[in-house]
Image: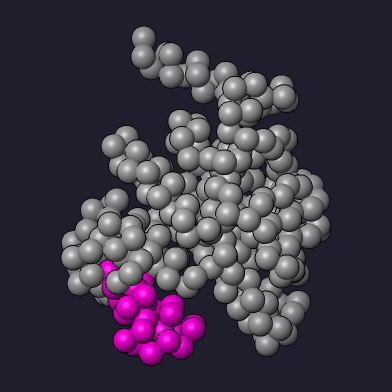
Amino acid sequence: MIQVTDVVKRYGPNTVLNGATFSIAEAQLTTILGPSGCGKSTMLRCLNRLESFDAGSITIDDVEVLGAPRGTLSAADEDALVHRVRARVGIVFQNFNLFPHLTALGNVIEAPLTVKKLPRAQAEEVGRHYLARVGLSGKEHHHPAQLSGGQQQRVAIARALAMEPAVVLFDEPTSALDPRLVREVATLLRALDDLRKTLVVVSHDLDFARAISDQVIYFEGGRAVETGTASAVFGSPAHPETRAFMDSFHDGRQGRAS
């Protein structure tokens, strides 16, 4: 479903992605882990054409995500590329990015109405279906300010799913949540298995990643250092960078406990 090959991304003299290469199979839930500044969130944004990149290639569901910087393509070509990519790739942002003036249902149906041009009745049917899938039946007419942080996140997930993408990206979905809500998010993501979506999660939370992941990709220095099943990467990482990261996490937990 996703093939990333030798992707390089620079901000001026700073190289954020340095030959990133990995693949993700269809319907897998993959978590990208790594220390702060390793390039994992930038990688996520490149997958959705929110960021351009300088070299390498990304293919998602047989669609090539061009790295060309904005302004180098014609407006029509840029719009066509973005439409092709985002018809297949949804994203749930770290801060949710809900429209405060719209209800939960209004947020979910906005893109189906404006991008897919669905009739309102059909869009509302789709929106109610996905709000129910994320446990928000009865909250359709609540505005974001009337919802908890966890509920707002569920609206954002329903909004991404309502476009029927093949791939959904999640940027640090547990960063602002308490431990109880982290467990709820883990349960929710695994409950989406029957939708056969390919889910890609960027996270710093190793316990969360261990609980949800089919595959784990460990990033460091702007590249994928190690890829494997959750049990392999957490149980017996092959690379010293991965082992050091895991050890520092466990040492930190032991220090807090003492």
Question: Can residue 145 be seen at all in this image of the molecule?
Answer: no
Q: Is residue 78 magenta?
A: no
Q: Is residue 113 above or below residue 228?
A: below
**Nearer to us in this view, 209 or 251:** 209
Picture coordinates of residue 111 (x, y %)? Answer: 44, 78
Apparent side of residue 19 relative to residue 220 in the rendered image (left or right)? right
Q: Is residue 244 above or below residue 5?
A: above
Residue lying at 70% horizontally and 34% vertically, measured from the top left = 226
**Nearer to us in this view, 127 or 204:** 127
Which quadrant of the figure contains the C terminus?
Answer: top left
Residues in magenta? 104-127
Residue lying at 63% horizontally and 71% vertically, measured from the top left = 85
Q: Is residue 107 magenta?
A: yes
The overriding secondary structure of the stretch rendered in magenta is helix
Apparent side of residue 91 relative to residue 88 in the rendered image (left or right)? left
Q: Is residue 187 above or below residue 79?
A: above
